[in-house]
Image (cartoon, rainbow, N blue to C red):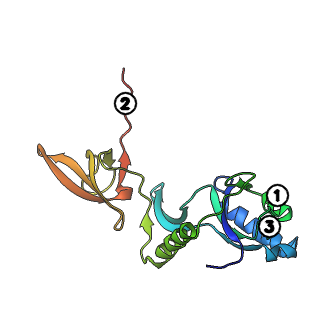
Amino acid sequence: MDKRGKWYTVQTLSGKEMKAKDSLERRVLTENKEMNDFVHEVLVPTEKVVEVRQGRKTTLNRKFYPGYIFMHLDLTDDAGKIREDVWHFVKATNGIINFLGGECPVALQDSEIEHIKLQLQAASEEKAVKPKIQFSIGEVVKIKDGPFENFEGAIVVIDLDRGKIQVSVTIFGRETPVEVECWQVERVEKEPNT
């Protein structure tokens, strides 16, 4: 672990995590080069996922912690007081709302930032892109593509690594598990009780 500074969690506008990171890094390089001594690293932990939109597969980056970024900063002086210049510099960056802890920012423990870095490392080492699965076991879905198109059933197994879902459908009066890709199903909208 680097002995300079500590890691802090900073709240950002939702969906603007990367813009906040880029804006802060750009400001350090162009507006206030002295901040380079205080702002050491900015992390936005993400992983690549596949999502099907309008029948097309697209790969996108999914954030592990939406609405938050992590900063390695020298935010306090030797006496433990907040450095007002660093505090205001970070807070004045576009997209940044506040430090976690507000006026008294709470530093992450070493074990917490190590866990986050291990998540990032595991995500970067995975060869296959994970599908974005937004279903849960027991949920009723309708198969919208393939040989079992228009069959409805409950999800019995979700395989995140392979991007497959096992759905229990009724074929010839018997419950039969059918394996499909996650993009081949859609939620069954519940009809309002009348």
Q: Nearer the viewer, residue 14 or 152?
A: 14
Residue located at (41% from left, 57% from top): 133
Report the amino acid beneath label 1. Answer: Ala
Quarter in which the N terminus is drawn: bottom right
Q: Name the residue at 57% across, 69% down.
A: 113
The picture quadrant where one finds residue 179 is bottom left
On screen, residue 106 above or below 59:
above
Q: Amino acid at mark 2?
A: Glu
Callout in the foreground (1, 3): 3
**Mark 2 to mark 1: distance in Å?**
48 Å
Per the rendering, the mark at residue 191 is 2
Q: Is residue 152 left or right of residue 170?
A: right
| Residue corresponding to mark 3 | 79
Q: Is residue 103 above or below residue 29?
A: above
x and y, in percent, of residue 151 in the image = 25, 46
Give the image location of residue 93, x and y in percent: 79, 60
At 46% across and 79% down in the image, what residue appears?
125
| Mark toward the viewer: 2 or 1 | 1
Q: Secondary structure at mark 3?
A: loop
Q: What crowding class fits label 1: few (fewer than 14 Cα within 10 Å), some (14-19), or many (20 or more)? A: few
**Nearest to N terminus: mark 2 or mark 1:** 1
Q: Residue at x 81, y 72 (%)?
A: 28
Asked if residue 128 lies left or right of residue 158, the reply is right
Residue carrying label 1: 92
Element under disc 1: loop
Is 97 drawn above or below residue 110 in the view shown? above
